[in-house]
Image (cartoon, rainbow, N blue to C red):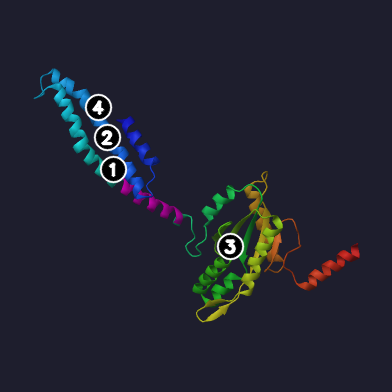
Amino acid sequence: MDLLRRWLSLQIDLGNFNSRGAIAGFALKMTFRAVILASLFSIAVLPLAHHFDLLPMGLGEALKLSVALSWLFGGAVSGALAIVTGNVIRDLSVSRAKFEHLSRTDMLSGLMNRRAFSDALNGTDDNASLAILDLDHFKSINDTHGHSAGDAVIRAVSDTIREIFGHQHCVARLGGEEFGVIVRGIGMAHRLVMVEQVRALIAARPIQCDGFEIYTTISAGVAEFRPDRRKESIYSAADRALYLAKAEGRNRVVHEEWGHRTIHEPSEMRSERAGSTVDAA
């Protein structure tokens, strides 16, 4: 019985119940095997019954009748049960998939949540950048306009991040006003450009809420994936770069390798830095 139970469980686990055709195939397969088992059982038991003179007919006729009834009634019953079972399993599979999606999605933003992002982080080894983005002065938005306005800002910023990175990259809300992005491929310079595009768009776009406009900005820290680098080290490096972006005045992108050099800085600072470079040369 244990062997039979494991065999049936294996059939259910391996079944594909995404379509009615798949369910029909499962039902046909299970019906055929149920009838075969019933027929084998009859072939094993009827000779014993014949030996003790318990059959009202000859052994040959009893075997033929038993096999026919197995196919007629056993096949119909087992087929119907298999179809019902297949539909139940399909519904359970759909529910499980929906639950799994919800368990990995941040409800407010619609982005991946921290759990899903951690899985993606652990599955990334090379040719990618980790960007941690944090809204600037978000608490003042909640204090001034209320939490509904704060939620509206989170949703609007999430839409902008999703607009730039799409589905090719991993985008998540890590909690509160903090977001994470794993930017894959396309070269480090291009990845940084995409992070800067997000920063610029968020700073330029007013967010409509209850008849008034809210402007906000983000700061971002970026670190690089390498095969020989631990994920904790990458995250810490991006977090330190984010801290530096905040310390330098916010509304800017800082890469872990730049020190105090940022993508976004006032033009006079860039001119001064360029002049210093010329003088040093």
Assess whether residue 216 is covered by the magenta stretch. Answer: no
Asked if residue 120 is positioned above or below residue 65 in the image, the reply reads below
Query: What's drawn in magenta, residue-wise?
Result: 86-101
What's the amino acid at mark 2?
A: Ala
**In this picture, is 17 found above or below 8?**
below
Q: Depth check: give the residue in front, 87 or 134.
A: 87
Residue 90 as seen in the image, left or right of residue 153: left
For the residues marked 2 and 1, what is the alpha-carbon distance in whole angstroms?
Answer: 10 Å
Q: Badges 2 and 1: C-beta atoms under 8 Å apart?
A: yes
Amino acid carrying mark 4 in the image: Leu
Q: Position of residue 59 (x, y in %)?
A: 15, 22
Q: Residues within 10 Å of mark 2 (few under 14, many from 20)?
A: some
Front tag of 3 and 2: 2
Q: Amino acid at mark 3?
A: Glu
Q: Which residue is mark 2?
A: 34
Circle 2 SS class: helix
Quadrant holding the N terminus: top left
Q: Which residue is mark 3?
A: 178
| Crowding near the residue tagged with mark 3, few <14, some 14–19, many ≥20 C-alpha atoms within 10 Å | some
- Using residue 238 as the reference point, say whether residue 105 is left or right of it: left
Q: Secondary structure at mark 1?
A: helix
Q: Earlier in the sequence, mark 3 or mark 2?
A: 2
* Kind of element beneath mark 4: helix
Whether pointer 4 and pointer 2 mark residues with C-beta atoms closer than 8 Å, the reply is: no
| Secondary structure, magenta segment, majority class | helix
Q: Is residue 99 magenta?
A: yes
- According to the image, label 4 marks what residue? 40
* Whole-number angstrom distance, CA of label 4 to CA of label 1: 20 Å
Q: Is residue 80 above or below residue 104?
A: above
